[in-house]
Image (cartoon, rainbow, N blue to C red):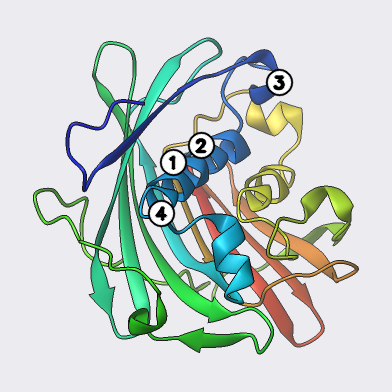
Amino acid sequence: MDNPNDLVWIEHFIVQASDSDFRGRAKLSFILEIMQRTADSAVNSLGLSVERMLEAGMGWMMITLDLEFHRYPLLNDQLTVHTWSKGTKGVLWQRDYRIFDEQGTQIAAARSTWALVDIEKRKLLRPTALPVQVNHYTGDSVGDIPEKVTLAKDITLEDAYHYQVRYSGLDSNNHLNNARYGDICCDVLSPEEWEPSVLKRFRITYVQEAKFGDEFIVQRALKMGESAWVQGQMGDTLFFAACLEF
């Protein structure tokens, strides 16, 4: 890693075969994962490792993410991820990202909101509860706090498939990892529907955390060539709402 600015954390990645789909494009879950890894490293550099967070009974919960692609990453691309803490508003933290290719060209940018939570009580904590000081970076901005994803009333959803949280989806906070939702959303489209589609933007709001054994119906509303609205719901419980834009 190369971090000339202590407030902007930088990590490098290569899109491997296991990170790409049948078209040689990086899986959305891989992009979400490298963003998550870079953010984890940034927080770890402050002396706040995942282990220390767990010992303190704290964890991070992503609320909303808005990710836009200028060029979609491909197999063997060398990617550089920049991230920084932009500031706080109430209980929310904003974290921005920029992703560059090996030529230094920006290919993606993202805005996200997070909350610090008490893992046992599942209660939101104020930023002052964090045991270390976080210095925010104001020298760059991807944009304002992203708006939560809400489905318009005129969107008609259809059931795509049933999902149950298993071991492979869990992370150290004992809930379905944020990056796994990339796969869940992309799985609503068939290979034939993906073939002509190029993802331009991905937005998601995590409404209810999903733990081991939780089940939900993944629903979609597809407008070919334009968008796919996706949500996971079981009964009256909405787990997430997302939108893939092409």
* Tag of residue 34: 2
Alpha-carbon distance for marks 4 and 2?
Answer: 14 Å
Q: Which residue is mark 4?
A: 43
Q: Secondary structure at mark 1?
A: helix
* 167 relative position to 146: left or right: right
Nearer the observer, disc 4 or disc 3? Answer: 4
Q: Is residue 21 visible?
A: no
Residue nearer the viewer, 143 or 188: 143
- Name the residue nearer the viewer: 150 or 127: 127
Tell me the distance, in whole angstroms, between the alpha carbons under discs 4 and 1. Answer: 9 Å
- Residue 245 sits above or below residue 115 on the image: above
Image point 27% across, 64% down: which residue? Answer: 134
Relative to 125, residue 75 above or below: above
| Residue at the disc numbered 1 | 38
Would you identify the image quadrant in which residue 22 lies?
Answer: top right
- The amino acid marked with disc number 3 is Ser
Labels 4, 1: front one: 4
Image x and y of residue 42, in percent: 38, 47
Q: Earlier in the sequence, mark 4 or mark 2?
A: 2
- SS at badge 3: helix
Left or right: 116, with 91 as reference point: right
| Residue type indicated by callout 1 | Thr
